[in-house]
Image (cartoon, rainbow, N blue to C red):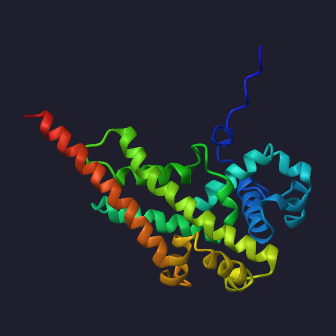
Amino acid sequence: MTDEPPPVIWARLSSQGRGPARTLDHEGITTAAIALADEDGVDAISMRKIAGRLDSSPMALYRHVGNKDDLTELMYDAVLGELDLTGIPSGSWRDDVARLAGQMRRLHHAHPWIARFGHRPSLGPHARRFREAGLACVDGLGLGINAMMDLLSTAMTFTRGFVQQELGEVEAQRRSGLDFAGYQRQAGPYIMQLLKDGRAPYLQRLIVEADDAPDPDVVFERRLAMVLDGLAVRIAARADVDTAGLG
């Protein structure tokens, strides 16, 4: 017989009630942890370091946050609260989803450590708010809840993948000391060797025809538009099937 896992952090917090204001609470701990993660990365977080910022003791923190998993859950939800969902849904699913994707990308750049979290559905208040707003954007299209979630998740998964590539480049620059232009200069002689061999025709086209330094904002919007185009086709096809079924 296995022990039942403890309730999720949100259930424990909701059962505490409001009570009088305290000098130390989970919100203050979360804010301090986010600042530490923004400065030094999420791996730098420890109860000892957070306690030092709050002029408290690590044991005092554990009375409010049970473990690091609880803490990162609180942190992830807190930064989701920075998303501006004003005016969503607007009535245009495509505009709304594009806006949510753009905001999610900017949030990842502001807090790069969040790329490691959010893979399991979060039940925090800001995560629930984002999910409700996102699904409201794609409601009224004749889709069931699974298809609505597929539509929203497809756009968000693209966004996370795109921004992880961007953050990966930032990390590569930090490790190597070379920006992308410097890497191009470093790799240039070998690329020329490959082109002389004539066995990489598409690499040659990329070198000759592609933009040398494309604007990442333009690239993101162009590729997101391709994703949304595909989703629009899928929605239209489903509508055609539904209409045909009524004949």
The quarter of the picture where residue 67 lies is top right
Q: Which one is in front, 1 or 53?
A: 1
Residue at the image position 36 percent from the left and 51 percent from the top: 136
Quarter where residue 142 is shown: top left
Q: How many marks?
A: 0
Residue 65 rendering spot, x and y as whole percentages:
78, 47
Residue at the outermost front position = 197
Does residue 50 lie above or below 117 as drawn? Answer: below
Tell me if residue 110 comes above or below residue 228 in the rendering: below
Which residue does the image show at 52% across and 72% down from the upper left? 201
Query: Nearest the camera: 61 or 148?
Result: 148
Q: Is residue 12 above or below residue 26?
A: above
Q: Where residue 185 sits: x, y (%)? A: 71, 86
198 with respect to 135 (left or right): right
Point 69% across, 41% down: residue: 9
Residue 118 image offset from top left, x and y in percent: 61, 50
Quadrant assignment, res 37: bottom right
Q: Quadrant of the N terminus?
A: top right
Report the front residue among 212 and 143: 212
Q: Position of residue 107 (x, y in %)?
A: 58, 67
- The quadrant of the picture occupied by the C terminus is top left
Residue sitting at 52 percent across and 82 percent down?
A: 214
Q: Is residue 88 visible?
A: no
Is residue 141 visible from the viewing direction of this image?
yes
Residue reaching furthest to the left = 247
